[in-house]
Amino acid sequence: MRAEAESLNEQITASVSLLRRHLDWDAAVRRLEELNARAEDPTLWNDAAEAGRVMRERGRLAGQVEGVQKLERDVADALGLIELAEAEGDEDTIKAALADLEGLAAEAKRLEIESLLSGEADANDAYLEVNAGAGGTEAQDWAEMLLRMYVRWAEKRGYKVSVTERSDGEQAGVKSATIQVSGANAYGWLKTETGVHRLVRISPFDAAARRQTSFASVYVFPVIDDKIEVEINPADLKTDTFRASGAGGQHVNKTESGVRFTHIPTGIVVASTQDRSQHRNRAIAMEMLKARLYELELRKREAISDAVEAGKTDIGWGHQIRSYVLQPYQMVKDLRTSVEKGNPDAVLDGDLDEFMAAALAQRVGATRSEASAAAR
């Protein structure tokens, strides 16, 4: 049992070292002290928007710093309890303390992943857009399966999900849909899901029960707040209004309440059918367009814009980031990180954290072993 305790302690120590490195520990502690001082200044609340920004940053940083400090205290307590229990031959207490260490190792891993969410917009809410590839009903059904997967993932994390736009397929599924996912670090978690997703299965729409390959694309961009200014030249916009499809009552289907903007210089298209009011949908679509342009600038800064845009040009072979195989075997594999899961049903029900964590680690350019080596 001593060996097991030491192994768990080594895992936790490695995670804590990585956490401190990602957070730039001394700078993070100083910044938290500054934010605590600002939060106690009553004049801060004269500017509600600024106060909100400060409190969000303070909450995020406090969660990270205090999480590490509590983790270190709890590990020390568990190890001390094991040492005392061994001296007294108390096997039950040793087993309970080992169980605590296992839980702390899992918590350390969670905090380690959270520390990767340090990008400029990672703390923001997110828009997630799904588009069916070529293939008619097959691809549209797959797009809806992906949409449900992300909704289930968000619900499991306690995030709020609202549908911004949805265009249903003629027989089943969706041609396209956009949802807003609201919650702490929603964009940070979801941003690596942008790309083409490939499904292999026996078609439920084929009487001959043949195996089919379908594609759908996912695109994620952050919701931006009033502090971020994005200028759009009205001459660069093409505006269309249209009748919303699908459920929503007679009003939705009989009036042109839907609004679509096309940003001519970039080719970005956004649409909103969320509200009965065309005026409100126009405002929502404009918010989405500004968010898309802002996200484009973020990707340019990260020097990955060309690769991502190339991945969006063709929803098909050669551009996929993840394959979901239901037949002839069962496997979900991320083609960027090589993470695999043999239970597609669980993945399609929202079990995505392992894929996201690996993609985040790859994106910041350091695996656990590389970071540990750098720390040494």
Image (tube, rainbow, N blue to C red):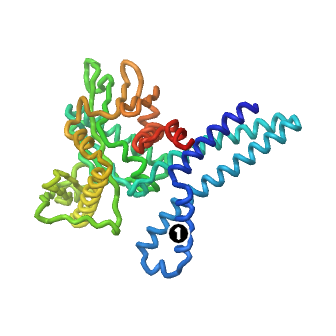
Residue 79 pos. (x, y %): 75, 42
Is 273 on the left-hand or right-hand side of 41? left
Q: In this view, does 90 lie above or below 16?
A: above
Name the kind of residue labelled 1 in the image.
Answer: Leu
Q: What secondary structure is marked by label 1?
A: helix
Where residue 105 sits in the image (x, y, percent)? 62, 41
Q: Nearer the viewer, residue 325 or 87?
A: 87
Q: Residue shown at 54%/45% (left/top)?
A: 18
Describe residue 276's horizontal placement relative to residue 236 as left or right: right
Q: Is residue 168 visible?
A: no
Q: Nearer the viewer, residue 150 or 17?
A: 17
Asked whether residue 213 appears in the rendered view, the answer is yes
Locate residue 160, reporting x and y percent.
43, 54
Q: In this view, does 177 lie above or below 232?
A: above
Residue sitting at 29 percent across and 35 percent down?
141
Number of numbered discs: 1
Residue 61: where, in percent of width, then height?
53, 60
Q: Nearer the viewer, residue 279 or 225?
A: 225
- Residue at image point 14% right, 65% down: 234
Q: Quadrant of residue 204?
A: top left
Residue in the picture at 33% in, 24% down:
201
**The N terminus - image quarter:** top right
Residue 322 left/right relative to 16? left
Q: Name the residue under label 1.
A: 35
Q: Which residue lies furthest to the right in this view?
A: 88
| Figure quadrant of residue 321 | top left
Rendered-image quadrant of the C terminus: top right
- Tag 1: Cα neighbours inside 10 Å, few (<14), some, or many (≥20)? some
Q: In this view, does 47 lie above or below 34?
A: below
Task: Judge by depth and name the residue closer to the eye, 306 or 347.
Answer: 306
